Image (spheres, rainbow, N blue to C red):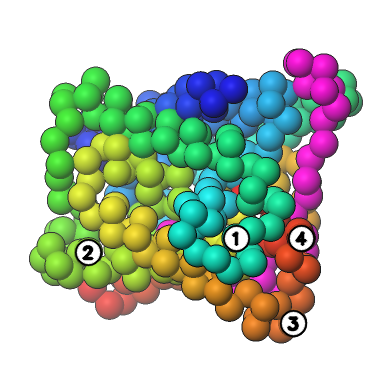
Amino acid sequence: MALFYLVLGVVFGFILSRSGAADYNYIQSMFLFTSFQLYGIIGTAVALTAPGIWLIKRYGRTALGKPISIELKPQHRGNVVGGALFGIGWSMCGMCPGPIFVNIGEGKVYAVAALAGALAGAGLFGAIYTRVQGYFRLPRLAVGTGDG
Amino acid sequence: MPLILHQLMPIHWAVAGAGIAAVTLALLFIANRRLGISTGLEDVCSFVLPAPYFARDAVRSARQWRLPFIVGLVLGGFLSAVLGGGFAPTWDLGMFDQVIGFGHPGKLAWMFVGGLFIGFGTRLAGGCTSGHGIFGLSNFEFPSLVSTLSFMAAGVLTTQLVYRVIF
């Protein structure tokens, strides 16, 4: 299965690379409202994924016959605050997490610094989780803040 | 507008969106996995950091798919560069170079700080553009709608502030 995930990652990475989703200028143009490209990409992806998920859940099983189970993300104050912090970072870097890896593959040197920062930020969050857990009403650790 | 990468013209947004949907649905239908990339940051942290947060079940059970997927993302970018004109390390950052400038050390510092916001923010929000924005919205999850509206709004505010006010 590892090869399957690797191939899907390559396809996903190639699409992000060639569509503008991993391009600094296109990300800024999205936030400046001067290009429709990224809104079109995300909108199309959601418009096609939504009925797909609905059909797969209705079918109830994977192609290999196992039951479908989707872990839902918990709701808490972190959604708003964390989302806002992430938005600042997305704007500054012109990359969200997937495109950080894609940009490194493309040879963008500065993307390595973005990855180092992202790992440090995630590490910091993990280190102070129990201290901010109460304020943000985060779930207990068996669940974490969810996949994603 | 051409991409920074070899000044290539991007593929049509509808094609890119359909491709992303295909990958997302293949992950779910074949492997019972929900798309999500920012948790992969935790997978990497979990190798070196002992905090209980990185030892929880959600991280351990998903490592087997996220790590190869992330390696695939890097390879996908590499393949795109090679097929699009060759792989060569570059510092090109488009608008940033024209409007903000700095130099290489400044650019690295800017990226590191931005990365901190990305790493901390996505973990606090419980997801990023893929897990909340693509999968969560498509699955009609309310926390994903809240998170997506929040990071889109913050992105708009930050870019407007940086490019229309400060620089």
Which quadrant would residue B88 be assigned to in this image?
top left
- Asked if B73 appears above or below A56 in the picture, the reply is below
Which chain letter goes with mark 2?
Answer: B
Magenta segment range? A61-90
**Share a chain, discs 1 and 3?**
no
Q: Return the residue at label 1.
A: B54
Look at the numbered discs 1 and 3 and tell me whether their residues touch, using CB distance below 8 Å.
no
Q: Return the residue at label 3.
A: A134
Q: For mark 2, does the 10 Å Cα neighbourhood hold few (<14), some (14 to 19), or many (20 or more) residues? A: many
Visible residue check, residue A80: no
Estimate the spatial distance between the alpha carbons at disc 2 and disc 3, rounded to whole Å: 34 Å
- Asked if A68 appears above or below A42 in the picture, the reply is above
Comparing labels 1 and 3, the label whose residue is closer to the camera:
1
Q: For mark 4, does the 10 Å Cα neighbourhood hold few (<14), some (14 to 19), or many (20 or more) residues? A: some
> Residue B108: which numbered mark, if any?
2
Q: Position of residue B87 (x, y in %)?
A: 17, 31
Which quadrant would residue B86 be assigned to in this image?
top left
- What amino acid is found at the position of numbered circle 1 in the picture? Phe
> Residue A142: which numbered mark, if any?
4
Q: Earlier in the sequence, mark 1 or mark 2?
A: 1
